Image: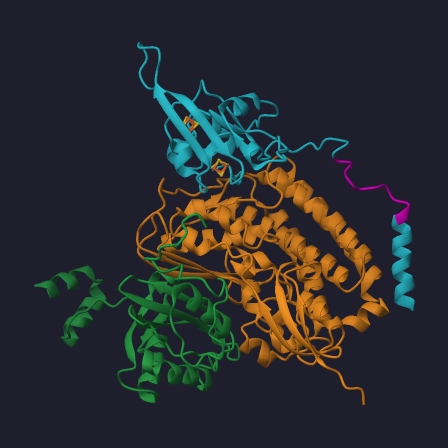
Amino acid sequence: MIRTEELLLNVGPQHPSTHGVFRIIVKLDGEVITEATPVIGYLHRGTEKLAENLTYTQVIPYTDRMDYVSAMTNNYVLCHAVETLMDLEIPERAEFLRLIVMELQRIASHLVWWGTYLLDIGAMSPFLYAFREREMIINMFNELCGARLTYFYMRVGGVKWDAPEGWIDKVRDFIPYMRDKLDEYEQLVSGNEIFLARVKGVGKYDAQTAIDYGLSGANLRSTGVKFDLRKNQPYSIYDRFEFDVPVQTEGDCYARYLVRFEEIKQSLRILEQAVEQFPEDGKIMAKVPRVIRPPEGEVYTRIESPRGEIGCHIVSKKKPQPYRLKFRRPSFVNLQILPKLLVGETMTNLVTILGGIDIVLGEVDG
Amino acid sequence: MSDQKHVTEMDPKEAKKEIEENEVVEIVEPSPNQAKLDRLVDLVKSNIAEDAVEEAYINELDRDLPSIVIRSPYWLKTAMMLKESETLKLNYLRNVSGIDYETYFEVVYYLLSMSTDNQQDICIKIKADREDPSIPSVTSVWNTANWNEREIYDLLGIQFPGHPNLKRIMMPEDWEGHPLRKDYEPIDPEV
Amino acid sequence: MKGIVKGMGVTLKNLTKKKITYQYPDVPLQMPDRFRGVQHFDPEKCIVCNQCMNICPTECIDLVGKKNPDPEKKGKVIDTYDINFEICILCDLCTEVCPTEAIVMTNNFELATYSRDDLFKNMEWLNDNNTNVRKENSINLQPKSIPSKAKKEVK
Ligand code: SF4
Ligand code: SF4
């Protein structure tokens, strides 16, 4: 027998495969991890504290910077929470615009994940393909709201900009284009033997564990739990559209890959219907008082972000500023399971498993 | 006098019934979740203790969310019961927030059941003193609580006895004070 | 092995396609009209109402007004107006609230410098930054104060 010494290895905080500033201290026995301790907080900006001194409208740009890969859903969860508190009726056209941008955002976010994940496990070119398509979505957003990443598009009561001329047609054209590209992706990667060997059976957990750790999004659905907030607790106008909730039962990295891949297709399906039903005309902003003062009370809203359940808990004291604003950040909650998954795995699987959870560090650290 | 006024406000049919039954007229908010809340309160009261529930109400602003306030000594036992109970099976902890109300702290747990069809959120609140706040940890019940409780400890300074590793998570180890407290004064205002 | 070969086929097919990369900075990037770039400020239009300073979520606007030098006219005129682009997040709120369109967005975005101090932009600089000014400005979402012209655009 070869005797190996225990080795303490520090990964990060600056390491490309950690997708941000994330540090993890692993104890290694040869190649096998015996203990893993994640260290987070390097990107903590205190959004929740800052929000206490800002008005609701002023907080929205801060949410852009939480999950910067999926800013639209973050915008929405805050607006939705305030609107629930104030019992506001949102104009139809605004809801459609919101839904369209959120689904586009889901596709863009999953594309980033797809590209970077494969990059993590050694495939260089998929990243370029994914970013080519993502660029189209980003350009659409840029035309719509004037920013490529930090959109600040939604406001309490509606959206800031109406769709410019021809924008909806662009979205319409994007759907078949993207479908075509997804086939290409599948040919490129899904059958690749090296890829399959890297992800199949890696980072496995069962439904019980997933629920116990409060996982959400694809991390939960990869274990066979069919839970998608868009279906189970519908918000916005999702109940008007037909779509499936993809589930896999394996619970390994490959299952998560398949779930996210299928989710892109389902998002395209929703988009297709939304573009068809898009109202010809209408307001994009509800009647909102100049100073937004939600009634005294408490609300917790949650929506399905690309990474899972993002929630917003507001305690209002009838002031223009929130008394307490707390975000339930899916990456933060999902990341908790990492130390458990890593024990007994080899060092090479660390990036596979970490990438499979799909975290955004801006969101983990709040 | 005040009863009279209530009666006139109700629709005639119901008012008549009320008068016939000769009961004290009380306008009850017709919340669809009232029954659920009552069942929940009964369950806690019969299984844990009569005085475990401090308060129970429907949060109308939040889509009629059933909310109960549990007294902190009973919290761990209640948590176990809620998770194990056949009817509720609240096995999914979706969010934990800590709030500083200046005179006291409050920790809010949002629970959901993933194994039953009844997907109703439940909101549980625990209060803690302003001086030396402490709430039993429920990490042993739901693993989700682990980092969430650490975050609340870090930012609000609430102790969670029973937590396996209650350390700061967002702020550096040597940080002074708890930033989310309302009376927090940064040592170095420039940071 | 089959899957790898199939993937290679896709790569080969894409090899002959047109390049999709931008040639920036050799070829300048054209941003769409709504793009939120560095602001342009027009001192003549400013009525020193302080709304932009108050709405700014990062508190990066500093402005000082002075009495109108022309004794016939009432009101104030702007004296100094600085934006700190170290912390400005180009969120659009200041241009949204400005009643006179004194501060508007442009499509310029190139701000990179060698020193942080250069990111403090004063009134002259902001006034000179007058190219590519955004056409659709001051779409104010607060219903009470939508100017009638902008209202049409919103619809
Ligand atoms: S764009 Fe936003 S951050 Fe920048 S000066 Fe205007 S209000 Fe302030
Ligand atoms: S909002 Fe416009 S008019 Fe008022 S102070 Fe600012 S720039 Fe001047």
Q: Is residue A39 magenta?
A: no
Please state which of residues A226 and B133 is positioned toward the viewer in this rendering: B133
Ligand 2 lies in quarter: top left
Q: What is the letter of the cyan chain?
A: C
Is residue B30 in view?
no
Magenta residue span: C15-24
Q: Can you tell which quarter of the image residue A247 is in? A: bottom right
Prevailing SS of the magenta stretch: loop
Q: How many numbered discs?
A: 0
Rendered location of residue C36, percent (x, y): 57, 35
Is residue B65 in view?
yes
Rendered location of residue A131, percent (x, y): 73, 50
Residue A78 left/right relative to A40: left
Where's the N terminus of chain C, which quadrant?
A: bottom right
Q: Where is C93 relative to B113, above or below?
A: above
Q: What is the letter of the green chain?
A: B
Q: What is the letter of the orange chain?
A: A
Rendered location of residue C114, percent (x, y): 63, 35
Q: Where is A195 relative to A346, above or below?
A: above
Rendered location of residue A185, percent (x, y): 80, 58
